[in-house]
């Protein structure tokens, strides 16, 4: 009887983690910027649309497992995806997903990647 009880005590948290779906989720716009970084020049070419993301996770809603999500990382990911220098018409969105085992926070950015034209 004691072995069965110990087994249940051990398996209950394991099963909770395995079957823990998203309890709640929400996202909202946090800002629109004409340019994500300082504009070094207004002589540029548009490379195309791009999206970037930064994510963080907190175990049991308290203990940080990864560094906090930030706008700079999301912008850098978007700019690097097209090989550009800056992001214009940037729209930032924050999303939070709450699970039984913790919280995931995401920051998304979408905009146009530009490359500065070098003068001769």
Image (cartoon, helix red, strand yellow):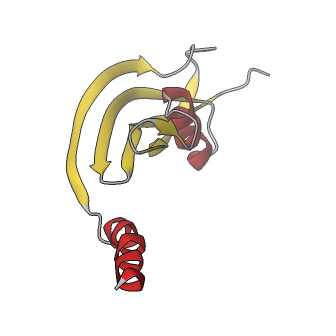
Is 40 drawn above or below residue 8 in the view shown?
above
Is 11 drawn above or below residue 39 in the view shown?
below
Q: Which quadrant is the C terminus positioned in?
A: top right
In the image, taking residue 51 as reference, residue 85 lies left or right, namely right
Is 60 drawn above or below residue 111 in the view shown?
below
Front residue of 92/112: it is: 92
**Residue 46 seen anywhere in this rendered image of the structure:** no
Instruction: Find residue 37 and report its horizontal and vertical position in percent.
Output: 55, 19
Q: Which quadrant is the N terminus positioned in?
A: bottom left
Instruction: Find residue 36 and report its horizontal and vertical position in percent.
Output: 49, 22
Is 102 drawn above or below residue 43 in the view shown?
below
In the image, taking residue 7 as reference, residue 63 lies left or right, namely right
Instruction: Find residue 103 and report its horizontal and vertical position in percent.
Output: 37, 44
Task: Write down the quadrant of residue 44 in the picture.
Answer: top right
- Most distant residue in the right direction: 120
Instruction: Find residue 18 and report its horizontal and vertical position in percent.
Output: 36, 72
The residue sitting at 34% across, 73% down in the picture is 15
- Most distant residue in the front direction: 1
**Residue 39 seen anywhere in this rendered image of the structure:** yes
The residue sitting at 55% across, 28% down in the picture is 72
Front residue of 45/89: it is: 89
The residue sitting at 30% across, 40% down in the picture is 95
Number of numbered labels in the structure image: 0
């Amino acid at each position: 009887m004691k072995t069965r009880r110990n087994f249940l005590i051990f398996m209950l948290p394991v099963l909770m983690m395995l079957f823990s779906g998203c309890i709640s989720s929400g996202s909202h716009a946090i800002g629109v910027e004409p340019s994500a970084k300082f504009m070094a020049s207004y002589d540029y070419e548009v490379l195309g649309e791009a999206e970037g993301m930064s994510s963080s996770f907190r175990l049991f809603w308290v203990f940080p497992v990864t560094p906090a999500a930030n706008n700079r990382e999301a912008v850098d990911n978007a700019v690097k995806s097209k090989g550009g220098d800056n992001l214009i018409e940037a729209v930032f969105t924050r999303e939070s997903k709450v699970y039984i085992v913790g919280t995931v926070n995401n920051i998304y950015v979408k905009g146009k990647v530009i490359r500065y034209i070098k003068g001769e």
